[in-house]
Image: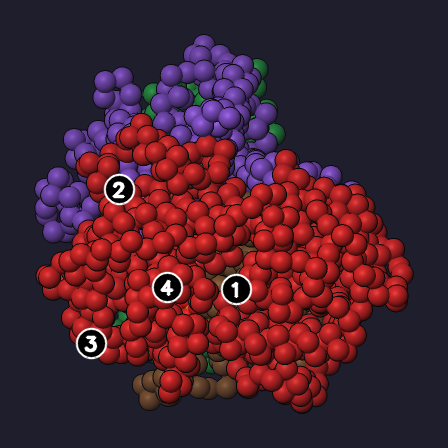
Chain colours: A green, B purple, C brown, D red
């Protein structure tokens, strides 16, 4: 029978994860496995647990998970491992003992530094900026924020982070928060959104406020959602990895585990058409973050 | 006519409803047992028919079950408490903070959390009884307030984890054969049953639900009774928060989001009238069980899992069942009025 | 009302930047759909009912309309479809509440869960991307914004006046005050209740469109929590939950007050985590104030 | 005996009308007709079907069988709206007004049958309301909210609506149940004016003297069937009562053999600002019935509520058996040995949805259920005793209170308070809306209790009742006790005191 691979996003309608799924579908087809893709409709750690338990019940062979909350999901994942199910984490890690590998799209440090450097370049290394995050709870957002702040303290003394506002992963909320931020901080030079709905939200706010060019927008986001704003000159650049590749790699890694082709301690891994990836410890590295801008954004469709 | 032979009119009707519910529950269970159990590729028996799954059902329904138990007397007095889910979240956070940040021992922190639950219930109670405000609106306000406080305390982001195993025992282990929290649930359920059906408290809850003015004229301490009901709800929500924390091993500001709706659904599904006065703890227990089995059972059906929609399906069916139960409850009356009209 | 005044005054003193026209216009634009739903909710509450399924209705209408728009249907067709869809969902509630005389709080609780989960089941939480020409009705942005704000305000004014000066408006109050008396006075309370639910549904459909034109994509969770916001606004605005009393103007003020909280926090440099707690406190303060006033009146 | 029929065709005819509620046959084939320009009384015991009959006429209920003819049109589907169009107006036992709306709006809603989208002309509405209120002789401002009106004022608003509708048929279901003598006279004047204008009035009352004063013909119902229509002139009180109950009832008050004992209650200068009662002083002895007379709104109920701790007194002293007491809640009052049978039995006296036995033990939870633990056997025995002693007609101790007729509900309410073994019993309108048979039974019970040494305060608006039952009569006027008269005083003396006229 076909192997069954179950893949869990943080929120299953989110365009980001849907683009991961596109890559995963491709990998599943190439490998001839059945792919299940289920997760909470809105980010919710408790629901992730229940779905993992359902998968254990069904007896899937591989679970690939983007953990909403490390500790929360790990109990369930350990239970899965006990039943002989192979577990990989992607996008956001679980506790190390609850999965075999983490498919690391980019180190938090890499993302944080890239974003901060890009922001500093756009502002000429001085002035006020603000951050829009998904929720104040999400672990990876906190990580990135930490590295952004570290880079700021280390290299850009003339720049000032004036506020961090949550957007609940909602574009509308990001937009209203950005509007409020701009009027509360008239000297604001840049908005940095570190969740994918946040970037178009901030861009829309800047556009509505008629501050195109005066307040710049950068962030972590999907090319498709931001193309329009990038071409209008509202958003300067979007930083991201190739999400399709992330999904693709996660599935390949999971299946390889199940087939015993990938074992702990390996230092490299070959994933189908994408070639070979480096493994650092138990992290499979996807590579460096990518900067999308006016020049290259039209070459991507996800 | 012999005076003793007359059946209690509404009570017998409810007995019938509870029997019906019980039959539904058993049928549900058998159905899932048949279709939801299988042997997986590694040769293990998995699905609904395993003891593990049954224990999971118990574990997963404990918190909502506790809230439903607490809400039954509230709804009997013709009140409502929308704030229970938020209060669960707030109490989970308080517990985490007391233990982790204030460095208290687990029992002390748990005790203080229960006190906080009582105080929060007391806030609802005070506003409802002292100012005679409608419970729906008061608890709508505290629904926001409690959740907001939980977020404010944790800045929305702090998650308390690493609880000692002795505490996690409450939520993840077994004691005398059953999951530990199931024992807590049984004890609270029995206590509630005695309170509602065997003491004058329960009697006065009903009287208040039917006619608060009438109860006041009969000399019943209406305000005190209503206050008791809300404070009790606060305490039980705090207890549910402890169990929730122990089950998931973490305390976070979003704990228990939406639980109020599930709890109310279970109570109403269990036959308690939202207008007050009528209802029973037995009904609530059956309602909780029916919903929990449905939810868990659906998730063991391979078809449903392959549709990637276990969660949605059980939500949909719960809502639809509630509508059905409501409609069913009025249909006989409706038919009889239609007939007399003709 | 007084509370709104105080808050605005406080803002004027501590954060004058709050009153820049452009952000304010944006704020009001975003709340225009909510205002429309609040109008309908006020009617429902005046008839002594409640509808907590509006959030789900809003989502369903948004997604339906979004799918049609994504297929290239013009706004002129999408709008009536969305309104009709809303009205049908409202009619479902109406039949159950008015026809079968079931308590509205449980009925709408059930339809809320059913609709929300049904939508998730069908759509799997997927977003719908809208065509560009849909934005702002295809008008320029500021013209679009003004269109929305003026529509909402005109609507509010029209409905407010109708409620006071049309027979139908007074019937709504009559039913909320005492349905049995209304029946004996020759009105048809069940029909009126039904109509009010349908009306709220239709307004929700309209509001969904007003929200749709503001963003390039539809998220299926878009209406989550709308019901509480709207009910809170109406109640903070002084509409009695026991029916029969209150008006739309209060609801309008209540909504403004609640929506001011978030931007006001930013301006006052208070951390965002307090937002929900403050909203809850406002609701409680409003009902406590009302409770105290009632107590004094009853003396 | 055949009634003399006026020659004109009847305004309204009912033929073989029948109506059942579930198993209860409320009406079983009743014939009834109403002429223009007559006052037609409907008489019958509680539950005889009077209210049901008029609900058929107003379209509030649809008959199971039979036909209704109005103005020569035989109607099958009568609705409240259609009845209104046909000129049928009704004043129900409980006024069916909108408490949150103003008087003018209430009148407008009744009288203007407009389309939903019609604009309301508030000025015309006000003018019309003012004019109509003047015609009825009501001194009520049209812009007051109905919730602030007293019961009789609300009834006047109802009558105003009927007059304004130009009704051809006006139905009044016990309109005087809560009216005082003066207001009753005022109402009679309005009714007579209506009759002169050619209107047919259907008039329901339990007070026979009103029927003799006002009605032209009377139809008597018994157990849902008509037992005959007669001209009032041909009837006497005894013949009417005989028709109603199918037997003779001596409408005599049980004699007082009062040997008043110790002073049980002494009230000195008691008042409460919130309820408008001030400076009340009196005392009640064991074995005595102390009647409280007064106009509606004189504050009798308020005084009772003060004694019972519902609106605690803020001035003065209350002594029970010589000891000063402060009653702050009904619970405390019960513990002290006070009992209060409230005025509105359906809302306050019994809980309609709960079984009779639970109603009966509601005030003695602490005593018969030690440690809050329910003892069902004990409760059942107690209830059966009371059902037997008070002759409560019911299907059983666990039948819901709402299944009983008014008089029997009142007995249940009484039983609840007797179960507390009180030292002082306060009865508020104990026989309001109770039929003659049950009424005399209740009177006997009250007298028996007094003879066993209980101190009784009896509030009543039924003057004959006060005069017949009381050993002493306290008269209240605008919130204070003005006079205490000896039992057997003349009716006119009591009235004069209640009205505050010099004697
Ligand atoms: N809506 C109803 N449902 C069930 N039974 C009813 C209903 N209305 C009236 N009844 C029953 O029908 C019978 C006749 O009641 P009705 O109210 O007509 O009596 P009535 O003569 O007006 O008595 P009263 O003097 O107490 O007003 C009673 O037995 C009553 O319990
Ligand atoms: N001076 C006053 N100030 C305020 N309220 C008053 C005053 N007098 C009477 N009332 C109100 O008028 C109403 C009627 O009073 P109450 O019920 O005590 O009269 P009653 O003599 O018992 O008449 P009933 O025949 O209705 O029993 C009550 O609601 C009372 O609060
Ligand atoms: Mg009657
Ligand atoms: Mg009175």
Which subunit holds the residue at mark 2?
Answer: D
- For residue D177, the mark is 1
Which subunit holds the residue at mark 1?
Answer: D
Q: Is residue C275 above or below residue A259?
A: below
Callout 2 secondary element: helix
x%, y% of residue D11? 82, 64
Left or right relative to C155: residue D37? right
Q: CA distance from mark 1 to mark 3?
A: 31 Å
x%, y% of residue D143? 56, 84
Residue at (54, 19) in percent of width and height: B27
Q: Which residue is mark 4?
A: D459
Q: Nearer the viewer, mark 4 or mark 2?
A: 4
- Give the mark, 2 or 3, whose residue is nearer the N terminus: 3
Q: Nearer the viewer, mark 4 or mark 3?
A: 4
* Image quadrant where residue B71 sits: top left
Left or right relative to C58: residue C81? right
In the rendered structure, are the residues bearing label 4 and label 2 in contact, judged by CB atoms less than 8 Å apart?
Answer: no
């Amino acid at each position: 029978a076909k192997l069954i691979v179950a893949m869990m996003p943080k929120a299953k309608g989110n365009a980001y994860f849907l683009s991961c799924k596109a890559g995963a579908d491709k990998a599943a087809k190439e490998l001839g496995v059945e792919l299940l893709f289920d997760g909470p409709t809105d980010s919710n750690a408790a629901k992730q647990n229940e779905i993992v338990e359902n998968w254990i019940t069904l007896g899937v062979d591989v679970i690939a998970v983007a953990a909403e909350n490390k500790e929360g999901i790990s109990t369930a994942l350990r239970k899965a491992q006990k039943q002989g199910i192979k577990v990989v984490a992607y996008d956001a890690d679980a506790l190390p003992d609850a999965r075999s590998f983490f498919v690391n799209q980019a180190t938090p440090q890499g993302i944080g530094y890239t974003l901060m450097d890009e922001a500093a370049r756009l502002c000429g290394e001085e002035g006020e900026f603000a951050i829009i995050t998904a929720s104040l709870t999400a672990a990876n957002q906190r990580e990135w924020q930490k590295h952004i702040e570290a880079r700021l303290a280390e290299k850009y003394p003339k720049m000032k982070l004036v506020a961090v506002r949550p957007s609940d992963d909602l574009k509308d909320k990001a937009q209203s928060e950005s509007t409020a931020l701009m009027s509360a901080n008239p000297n604001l030079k840049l908005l940095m959104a570190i969740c994918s709905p946040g970037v178009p939200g901030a861009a829309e706010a800047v556009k509505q406020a008629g501050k195109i060019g005066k307040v710049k927008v950068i962030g972590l986001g999907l090319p498709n959602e931001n193309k329009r704003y990038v071409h209008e000159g509202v958003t300067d650049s979007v930083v991201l990895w190739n999400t399709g590749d992330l999904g693709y790699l996660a599935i390949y890694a999971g299946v390889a585990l199940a087939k015993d082709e990938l074992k702990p301690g390996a230092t490299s891994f070959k994933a189908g058409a994408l070639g070979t990836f480096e493994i650092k410890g138990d992290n499979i590295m996807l590579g460096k973050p990518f900067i999308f801008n006016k020049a290259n954004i039209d070459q991507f469709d996800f | 006519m012999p005076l003793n032979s007359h059946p209690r009119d509404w009570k017998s009707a409810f007995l019938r409803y509870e029997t019906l519910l019980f039959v539904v529950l058993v049928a549900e269970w058998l159905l899932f047992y048949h279709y939801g159990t299988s042997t997986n590729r590694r040769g293990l028996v998995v699905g609904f028919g395993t003891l593990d799954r049954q224990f999971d059902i118990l574990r997963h329904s404990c918190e909502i079950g506790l809230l439903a138990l607490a809400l039954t007397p509230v709804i009997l007095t013709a009140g409502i408490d929308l704030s229970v889910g938020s209060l669960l979240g707030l109490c989970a956070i308080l517990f985490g903070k007391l233990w982790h940040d204030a460095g208290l021992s687990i029992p002390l922190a748990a005790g203080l959390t229960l006190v906080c639950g009582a105080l929060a219930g007391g806030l609802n109670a005070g506003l409802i009884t002292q100012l005679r405000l409608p419970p729906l609106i008061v608890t709508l306000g505290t629904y926001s307030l409690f959740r907001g406080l939980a977020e404010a305390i944790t800045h929305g982001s702090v998650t308390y984890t690493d609880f000692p195993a002795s505490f996690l025992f409450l939520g993840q282990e077994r004691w005398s054969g059953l999951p530990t929290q199931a024992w807590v649930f049984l004890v609270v359920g029995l206590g509630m049953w005695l309170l509602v059906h065997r003491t004058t408290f329960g009697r006065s809850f009903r009287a208040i639900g039917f006619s608060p003015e009438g109860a006041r004229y009969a000399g019943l301490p209406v305000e005190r009774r209503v206050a008791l009901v809300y404070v009790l709800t606060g305490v039980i929500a705090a207890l549910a928060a402890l169990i929730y924390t122990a089950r998931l091993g973490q305390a976070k500001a979003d704990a228990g989001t939406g639980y109020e709706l599930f709890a109310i659904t279970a109570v109403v599904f269990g036959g308690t009238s939202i207008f007050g006065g009528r209802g029973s703890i037995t009904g609530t227990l059956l309602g909780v069980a029916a919903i929990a089995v449905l939810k868990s059972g659906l998730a063991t059906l391979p078809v449903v899992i392959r549709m990637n929609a276990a969660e949605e399906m059980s939500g949909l069916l719960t809502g639809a069942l509630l509508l059905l139960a409501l409609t069913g409850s009025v249909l006989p009356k409706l038919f009889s009025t239609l007939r007399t009209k003709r | 009302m007084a509370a709104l005044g105080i808050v605005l005054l406080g803002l004027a003193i501590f954060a004058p930047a709050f009153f820049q026209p452009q952000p304010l216009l944006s704020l009001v634009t975003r709340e225009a759909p909510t205002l429309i739903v609040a109008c309908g909710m006020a009617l429902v509450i005046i008839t002594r009912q409640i509808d907590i399924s509006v959030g789900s209705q809003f989502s369903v209408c948004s997604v339906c309309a979004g799918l049609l728009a994504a297929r290239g249907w013009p706004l002129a067709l999408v709008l009536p479809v969305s309104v009709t869809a809303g009205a049908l969902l409202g009619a479902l509630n109406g039949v159950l509440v008015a026809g079968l005389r079931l308590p509205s709080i449980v009925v709408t609780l059930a339809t809320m869960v059913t609709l929300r989960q049904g939508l998730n089941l069908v759509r799997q939480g997927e977003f719908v991307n809208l065509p560009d020409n849909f934005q702002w009705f295809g008008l320029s942005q500021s013209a679009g914004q003004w269109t929305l704000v003026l529509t909402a305000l005109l609507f509010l004014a029209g409905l407010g006046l109708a409620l006071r000066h049309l027979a139908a408006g007074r019937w709504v109050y009559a039913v909320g005050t005492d349905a049995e008396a209304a029946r004996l006075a020759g009105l048809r309370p069940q029909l009126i209740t039904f109509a009010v639910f349908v009306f709220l549904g239709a307004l929700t459909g309209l509001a969904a469109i007003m929200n749709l034109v503001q963003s390039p994509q539809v998220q299926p969770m878009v209406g989550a929590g709308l019901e509480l916001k709207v009910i809170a606004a109406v109640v903070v605005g002084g509409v009695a939950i026991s029916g029969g009393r209150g008006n739309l103007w209060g609801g309008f003020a209540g909504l403004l007050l609640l929506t001011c909280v978030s931007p006001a926090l930013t301006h006052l440099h208070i951390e965002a985590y307090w937002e929900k707690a403050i909203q809850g406190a406002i609701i409680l303060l409003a009902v406590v104030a009302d409770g105290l006033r009632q107590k004094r009146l009853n003396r | 005996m055949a009634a003399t029929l006026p020659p004109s065709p009847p305004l309204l005819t009912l033929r073989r009308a029948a109506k059942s509620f579930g198993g209860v046959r409320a009406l079983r084939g009743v014939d009834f007709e109403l002429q223009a320009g007559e006052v037609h009384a409907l008489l019958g015991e509680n539950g005889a079907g009077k209210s049901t009959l008029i609900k058929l006429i107003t379209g509030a209920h649809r008959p199971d069988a039979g036909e209704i003819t109005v103005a020569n049109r035989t109607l099958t589907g009568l609705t409240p709206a259609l009845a209104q169009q046909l000129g049928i107006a009704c004043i129900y036992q409980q006024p069916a007004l909108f408490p949150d709306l103003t008087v003018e709006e209430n009148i407008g809603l009744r009288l203007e049958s407009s389309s939903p989208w019609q604009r309301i002309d508030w000025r015309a509405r006000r003018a019309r309301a003012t004019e109509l209120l003047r015609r009825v002789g009501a001194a009520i401002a049209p812009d007051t909210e109905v919730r602030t009106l007293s019961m009789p004022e609300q009834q006047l608003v109802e009558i105003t609506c009927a007059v304004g509708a130009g009704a051809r048929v006006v139905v009044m279901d016990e309109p005087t149940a809560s009216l005082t003598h003066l207001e009753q006279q005022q109402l009679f004047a309005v009714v007579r004016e209506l009759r002169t204008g050619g209107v047919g009035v259907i008039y329901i009352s339990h007070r026979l003297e009103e029927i003799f004063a006002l009605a032209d013909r009377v139809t008597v119902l018994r157990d849902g069937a008509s037992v005959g229509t007669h001209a009032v002139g041909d009837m006497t009180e005894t013949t009417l009562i005989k028709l109603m109950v199918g037997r003779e009832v001596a409408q005599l008050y049980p004699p007082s053999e009062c040997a008043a004992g110790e002073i049980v209650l002494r009230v000195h200068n008691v008042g409460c600002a919130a309820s408008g009662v001030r400076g009340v002083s009196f005392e009640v002895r064991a074995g005595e019935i102390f009647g409280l007379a007064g106009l509606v709104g004189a504050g009798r109920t308020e005084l009772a509520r003060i004694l019972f701790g519902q609106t605690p007194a803020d001035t003065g002293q209350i002594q029970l058996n010589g000891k000063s007491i402060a009653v702050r809640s009904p619970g405390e009052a019960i513990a002290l040995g006070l009992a209060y049978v409230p005025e509105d039995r359906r809302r306050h006296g019994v809980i309609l949805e709960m079984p009779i036995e639970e109603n009966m033990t509601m005030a003695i939870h602490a005593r018969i259920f030690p440690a809050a633990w329910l003892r069902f056997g004990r409760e059942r025995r107690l209830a059966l005793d009371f059902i037997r002693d008070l002759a409560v007609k019911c299907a059983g101790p666990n039948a819901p209170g709402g299944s009983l007729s008014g008089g029997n509900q009142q007995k249940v309410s009484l039983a609840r308070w007797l179960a507390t073994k009180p030292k002082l019993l306060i009865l508020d309108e104990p026989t309001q809306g109770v039929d003659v048979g049950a009424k005399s039974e209740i009177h006997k019970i009250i007298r028996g209790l007094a003879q066993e040494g209980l101190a009784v305060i009896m509030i009543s608006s039924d003057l004959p009742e006060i005069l017949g039952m009381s050993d002493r009569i306290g008269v209240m006027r605008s919130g204070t006790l003005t006079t205490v008269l000896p039992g057997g005083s003349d009716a006119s003396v009591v009235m004069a005191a209640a009205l505050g006229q010099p004697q």
